[in-house]
Image (cartoon, rainbow, N blue to C red):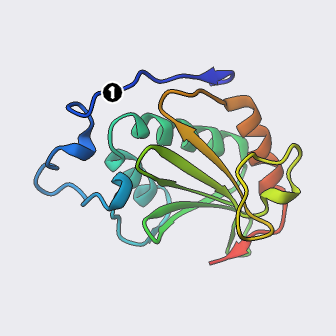
Amino acid sequence: MTGKTARKPATSATRPETQDAPAGAPKLLAGGNPQIPKGYGDEPVQAYIAAMPGWKRDVGKELDAIVTRAVPGLRKAVKWNSPLYGAGDDGTWFLSFHCMTKYVKVAFFRGAALDPTPPGPSKQANVRYLDIHEDKPFDAAEFEAWVKQASRLPGEKM
């Protein structure tokens, strides 16, 4: 999907993070972030996305689809209750995302080297963030351009 993506606001009564999770569903941690066991490959990433609450699940699906389409030879994993994406065989990662209370935080581990630089600053010199809010569209084409650039930079060992 290209262009800007908007989502409809949900009321607190319809937000899954305010309701009890079904039996056997992953526990939601602070901000509605799913607690998913560490694992490598697409399966744990898809489990994480499926457990994302409410509108955040659609964001996770879109982010995953864009990264998967944009990066040949993509590697995926879940560590520290966040999906990680890597390129190549060096065991490094270039991107991750995480559910926060009111947004999905995308981390570009070498984001300071991207052009244009993603808008969210970090205390770490190389990291930049993109915060995706329910009521504010994000530019999917710009995100894909950042993903392509980030996948060609040296990654982070984690």
Expressed as whole percent of the image width and height from the top left, the position of residue 100 reads: 45, 52
For image coordinates 54% across by 35% down, the residue present is 62
Nearer to the camera, 120 or 50: 120
Expressed as whole percent of the image width and height from the top left, the position of residue 59 reads: 49, 37
Nearer to the camera, 29 or 95: 29
Residue furthest to the bottom: 157
10 sits to left or right of 68: left
Nearer to the camera, 140 or 68: 140
For image coordinates 72% across by 49% down, the residue present is 72
* Quarter of the picture holding the N terminus: top right
Residue assigned mark 1? 10
**Residue 107 vertical placement versus 9 (above, below):** below
**Residue 3 vertical placement versus 57 (above, below):** above
* Quarter of the picture holding the C terminus: bottom right
The amino acid on which the numbered mark 1 sits, given as a three-letter code, is Ala
84 sits to left or right of 124: left
92 sits to left or right of 34: right
> Which element type, helix, strand or loop, lies under badge 1?
loop
